[in-house]
Image (tube, helix red, strand yellow):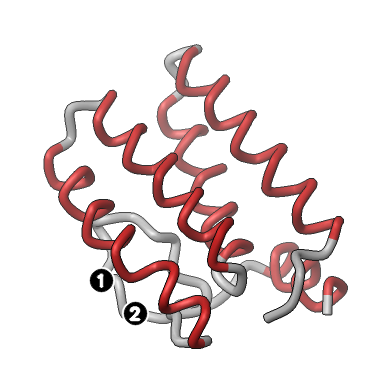
Amino acid sequence: MSAVPAMIRERLRGDLATAREARRAGERERSWELLEDAHVLSQPWWGWHVRVHASMLVAGMLARDGREVWGQCLRLVVAGPGSVLGRFPAGNPGRARVPATQPMPIRDDLAELLRAAR
């Protein structure tokens, strides 16, 4: 896919920054919700897709969640190539608790943002 549209790029920057702030404030669930949204939005663009998984890896490490850390390490290996090849499970939230290849419905607001960006 081509360059990341500005509306997606700004949303991704905001979600990652707010997720970091939420994590620092002890709001882990809110942080993960933002990271999952960022993952869904980032999938078509390899650089952002990898960046989101790196943020998820950090969150997993700080939470001392071995399953999440292992899952994110695996996803970091395949995220970039999957995006470049257009082979990613659309709508998948990117967490280790969900199979890495399982597509899922995209929430309406995120789907609209992706449609508007094309």
Disc 1 to disc 2, C-alpha distance? 5 Å
- Residue 79, percent from left and from top: 40, 67
Do callouts 1 and 2 mark residues in contact (Cβ within 8 Å)? yes
Quarter of the figure with residue 16: top right
- Residue 67: x and y in percent read 14, 47
Residue 11 horizontal side relative to residue 55, left or right: right
- Dot 2 lies on which element? loop
Seen in the picture, residue 102 relative to 18 is either above or below; the reply is: below
Which residue is drawn at the image coordinates 67% and 81% (left, top)? 1
Residue, far left = 66
Q: x, y (%) of residue 106?
A: 59, 73
Tag of residue 49: none
In which image quadrant can residue 44 be found?
bottom right
Quadrant placement of the C terminus: bottom right
- Using the image, tell me which numbered label, if any, was put on residue 102: 2
> Element at badge 1?
loop
* Three-letter residue code for mark 1: Pro
Asked if 72 appears above or below 58 in the picture, the reply is below
- Return the residue at label 1: 99
